[in-house]
Image: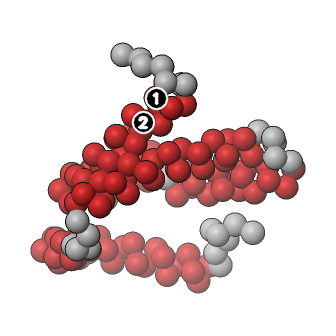
């Protein structure tokens, strides 16, 4: 069963929540983000976590693609297709923003995410970039590409 199989009431609750977020004062949003970002975890630790999480999530993607192709059997292929479809639906607002289809004064989600991460998650981003470089190096058998 898909995690996004919501009844009408649940969908309405989510819509109400999203609409109420857009009405919040910018100072309140900034205060929330500041509190949310203040995990108290040291930057070096977040850097290391970002580095070692990249290869893990890379492999998760590889397994997902294999399952979608049916390499793990019909049951896993169906489950992977449902996950892919759910992810496609969830990311629709981001694709709309990228293609310029956002209208009606909606908050630019993608630019908010980028600004937030650049302000509060520099160590995590640097770790993920280094993890990505290592993963690419390892997945090509140690071949260095420029």
Which residue ends up furthest to the right in the rendered image? Answer: 74
Q: Position of residue 54 (x, y in %)?
A: 45, 47
Image quadrant where residue 99 sits? top left
The mark found on residue 12 in the picture is none
Q: Secondary structure at mark 2?
A: helix
Which residue is drawn at the image coordinates 24% and 53% (left, top)? 123
| Label 1 packing within 10 angstroms: few (<14), some (14-19), many (20+) | some
Q: Which residue is labeled 2 in the image?
A: 134
Q: Between 110 and 50, which is closer to the camera in this rendering?
A: 50
Q: Is residue 143 above or below residue 111?
A: above
Which residue is drawn at the image coordinates 85% and 55% (left, top)? 75
Q: Is residue 129 above or below residue 122?
A: above
| Label 2 packing within 10 angstroms: few (<14), some (14-19), many (20+) | some
Q: Between 14 and 39, which is closer to the camera in this rendering?
A: 39
Work out how far the residue at label 1 is from the one at label 2, CA to CA, in angstroms: 5 Å
Q: Which residue is labeled 1 in the image?
A: 137
Q: Quadrant of the N terminus?
A: bottom right
The answer to whether residue 2 is visible is: yes
Q: Position of residue 61 (x, y in %)?
A: 59, 45
Q: Position of residue 87 (x, y in %)?
A: 57, 54
Mark 1 in CB contact with mark 2 (< 8 angstroms): yes
Is 117 left or right of 60, judged from the image as shown? left
Which residue is drawn at the image coordinates 32% and 48% (left, top)? 127
Is 105 left or right of 144, judged from the image as shown? left
Q: Position of residue 13 (x, y in %)?
A: 49, 81
């Amino acid at each position: 069963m898909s995690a996004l199989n919501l009844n009408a009431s649940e969908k309405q609750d989510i819509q109400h929540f999203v609409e109420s977020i857009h009405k919040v004062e910018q100072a309140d949003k900034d205060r929330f983000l500041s509190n949310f970002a203040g995990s108290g975890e040291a930057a070096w630790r977040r850097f290391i976590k970002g580095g070692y999480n990249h290869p893990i999530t890379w492999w998760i993607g590889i397994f997902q693609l294999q399952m979608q192709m049916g390499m793990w059997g019909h049951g896993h292929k169906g489950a992977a297709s449902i996950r892919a479809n759910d992810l496609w639906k969830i990311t629709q607002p981001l694709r709309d923003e990228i293609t310029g289809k956002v209208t009606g004064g909606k908050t630019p989600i993608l630019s908010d995410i980028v600004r937030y991460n650049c302000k509060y998650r520099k160590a995590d981003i640097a770790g993920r970039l280094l993890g990505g470089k290592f993963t690419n190096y390892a997945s090509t058998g140690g071949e260095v590409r420029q």
